[in-house]
Amino acid sequence: MPAPLPIDRVYREESSRILATLIRLVGDFDLAEEVMHDAFAAALEQWPGHGLPENPRAWLVSTARHKAIDRLRRDIRFRAKQEELARWAAEPAWQDAPEDVGHSDSVAVADDRLRLIFTCCHPALALEAQLALTLRTLGGLTTEEIARAFLVPVATMAQRLVRAKQKIRTAGIPYRVPPADQLEERVEAVLSALYLVFNEGYAATSGPELLRPDLCAEAIRLARIVVSLMPGRPEASGLLALMLLHDARRAARVSTNGELVRLELQDRRLWNRDQMGEGIALTESALKKGGPGSYALQAAIAALHAEAADAAATDWRQIVELYGELCARYPSPVAELNRAAAVGEAYGAAEGLRLLDDLDRRGELARYHLLFAARARFLARLGRKSEAAAEWERARDLATNAAERRFIEREIASAGPPHEAPNSYTAK
Amino acid sequence: MRYMLLIYDRESDWAAMSEAESGKMFQEYMTFTEGIRKSGHMVAGDALQPVSTATTVRVRSGKTVSTDGPFAETREQLGGFYIVEAKDLDEATAIAAKIPGSRTGSIEIRPIMDVPKG
């Protein structure tokens, strides 16, 4: 039996990189997507007979580029485009330039995916369009998946993506990393898009896989380049630190039977200590550089979890302080919820529950399942079992992610506070 | 690419200016225009008479109907425009941000449609 050809793997691992290069070469998102798919279709036909090319990505890029030239030749406005055609034919680079991140002051970073994310996050695009386009092109998510993540109908999301791509083309939004003097105002959107890509990999909103480590790795890789672009700015290193610290727990987050494992039940021997060390060092340097930003504060919280030898050793009081600072600087009901949960750990369930009750009364999180999950946990610890059960059910009805819903089902089934629950789903 | 930069401003602000102030503003526009002419970005540009001089025309069922006033009453009025040649939206934005009216009003940047000339 012939070995299966690894086209699927090449697609999964290389398509965002190929797409980014093609967008640079042909200057058009839609055309780039179409010809990339043409090239993969050609690979399906040719690779089984001829074998895998030495460099599959180079083969796909050059095939796609020829497909693009063919398509353009057929274009009725061919003459008007001749100049463009000449430019493409002259473009020698079918690949990214070497990924050299050593030149921190060089703004001419030759990384197609970095350019792509700056284009997707251009301020001339609406915020939702920026994020959707980033997930589509860099994250490789389908329109259906993005629509689900944003809780909008598929048709709405499809139209949003079409309009955004149209605007990039028609309004002349450039495909490049902005010059140094504009980096400051442009980088914030890029960081939030990177964090979104990371989160999609860390807790996929859809699809068969719970985690998509390729997306996490890509977000981390790009964040490293952004950090090297702006060495003096703590926000980028704060985000990099946060992602490294979260990602370092990956192996312990999913049990052998594919279920999510709560932080306090994770087998800490599975944590990637080298990566945590790097994350902690980056957090410390980000905190030292002036008023800590939101990512650096969250990284500091993640670092405290990383430093605890076991769940019981967690410095919850310090975590309460950090969440307090986060709430003061970047007020949000979700940050308050996290602070309330930390207060419950540090100062007792009754104190945490009091804060959660306040939040519940304000109604801003009326549709957020984690508020009710936290209430359920504290109620159970206080022995108020029937109230806890009702809260777990509210949480389950609001959860949109199938894995989270299963997780809540297990909590309901075990009907007790989580630290008394059988740890059968702890990763081994 | 060519872009049209539409300058929206409150006409009432202009009316309220002293002669010295409006003279200074005028001078700033002259300097700006000269600057983009020298840099090769300028294609065209003009200031418009106030909205009170506007006439709107519509043809309905073959009948021409003219009315006094602008197409739409807005808080800021179209007061002038430039057409510039820029390599991309970032360059056009940088030029628009130097228009004196950008500090008091707003500049709308519109790419000009490329119509193949047959």
Image (cartoon, coloured by chain):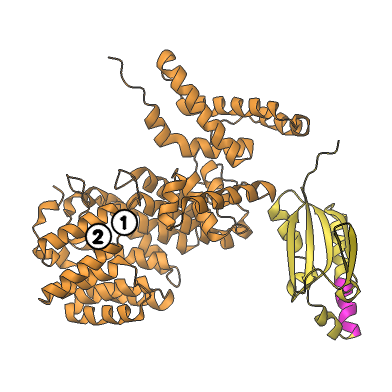
A422 within the magenta span: no
When the figure is inspected, residue A55 is found, relative to residue A182, above or below; the finding is: above
Residue A230 x %, y %? 52, 57
Element at badge 2?
helix
Instruction: Give the image quarter of residue A299.
Output: bottom left
- Which chain's residue wears label 1? A
Q: Are marks 1 and 2 on the same chain?
A: yes
Q: Which residues are magenta?
A: B19-28
Q: Quadrant of residue A406?
A: bottom left
**Residue sitting nearer the eye, A235 or A57:** A57
Quadrant of res A263: bottom left
Q: Is residue A302 above or below residue B16?
A: above
Residue linked to disc 2: A306
Which residue is rendered at x = 88% and y = 76% of the image?
B52
The colour one sees for chain A in the rendered image is orange
Say whether residue B24 is magenta.
Answer: yes
What color does chain B have in the rendering? yellow
Mark 1–mark 2 Cα distance, whole angstroms, equals: 7 Å
- Quadrant the N terminus of chain A occupies: top left
Q: Are marks 1 and 2 in contact (CB under 8 Å)?
A: yes
Label 1 is placed on what type of residue? Leu
- Name the residue at 21% across, 56% down: A407
Could you classify mark 1 by the number of other residues whose Cα lies within 10 Å: few (under 14), some (14-19), or many (20 or more)? Answer: many
